[in-house]
Amino acid sequence: MAKIIRRERLVPNLHLLEIEAPQVARKCKPGQFVIIMPDERGERIPLNIADWDSEKGTVTSVFLVVGTSTQKLSILKSGDEVPVFVGPLGKQSEIKKFGTILCAGGCYGIGAVYPVARAMKEAGNKVISLLDVKANYLLYWEDKLKAVSDEFFVSSRDSYYDCKEFIPKVLKDVVKTTKIDRVISYGCTYLMYTCSEATRPLGIKTIVSLNPIMLDGTGMCGACRVSVDESTKFACVDGPDFDGHLVDWQELFSRRKSYFDDEIQSLCYWEKENFPKS
Ligand code: FES
């Protein structure tokens, strides 16, 4: 069992979860993830590690509410316990001095890219953070990202920030004036795909953190298989970071949709059971 220290809604539909897990916190590295089960009947879901405190013994993730399991997570309170919390899993991101790094994050990926941006800064890189939100009220962790960035941009579809364009267009504009040595793109599959397509013709290496369906998270079940550079990889042990220019994105999109109908049904049953009058 692992105890919830904090669960709070950061912005609509995105929540922060801080869990007491000293053994996990001691070993966390940027780019890794954890697997959590909200209850004993729930599924195992992978969450990127967004921060950790090895002295306090806590691990923090940011998650988007998309189905039954994340709904269950979103109503946990501090003091509650989850039956399974495993990690850190996956390989850590490649951190070294590359020059100038552009960290592009959207949705839960804003939290997930934070430890990578911080580590890249500590390794002596110039860090440019580029965050994408649909509207200004969906932005979170602005202060944390600014603190580890040399330059900081936000693009949102409303008129609140300077730019209304979707992130790949902004990315292309930035690279016209600044030499970028590596792009790190974390967030939903579509964001990572479009960022990779934007940098492909420019030849800028682009690292993405893949988010296929996972079960065990240790390379045993094969649920998380993805095709990268025409060979099969397991995102949980070979990744989750991969070169975005080598990923078979269409296969990933289609595999992620495998349980779409079941997810909707499951959520309907769960809501009826838990909120019968709503
Ligand atoms: Fe089972 Fe990766 S989640 S092999």
Image (tube, helix red, strand yellow):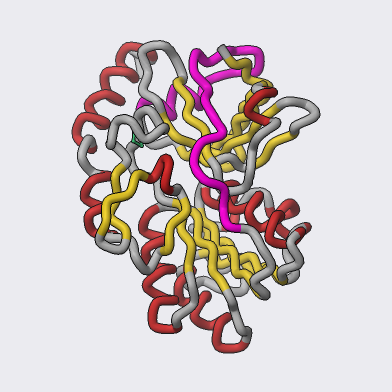
Q: Which residues are magenta?
A: 68-94
In the picture shown, does residue 274 fall above or below 98?
above
> In the picture, which quadrant includes the N terminus?
top right
Picture residue at 51% right of the left edge, 36% below the top: 89
**Residue 75 belongs to the span the image colors magenta:** yes
In the picture shown, does residue 3 fall above or below 102?
above
Where is residue 76 drawn, in percent x and y?
A: 55, 19
Residue 13: tell me if it is visible. no
Where is residue 270 drawn, in percent x and y?
A: 32, 18
Where is residue 88 drawn, in percent x and y?
A: 56, 34
Badge count: 0
Where is residue 224 drawn, in percent x and y?
A: 32, 40
Q: Quadrant of residue 104?
A: bottom right
Picture residue at 69% right of the left edge, 36% below the top: 52
Residue 8: tell me if it is visible. yes
**Residue 54 belongs to the span the image colors magenta:** no
> In the picture, which quadrant includes the C terminus?
top left
Picture residue at 27% right of the left edge, 56% below the top: 231
In the picture shown, does residue 168 fall above or below 122?
below
Quadrant containing ligand 1 reads: top left
Left or right position of 244 against 81: left
Q: Quadrant of residue 53?
A: top right
Left or right position of 194 against 260: right
Picture residue at 46% right of the left edge, 19% below the top: 38
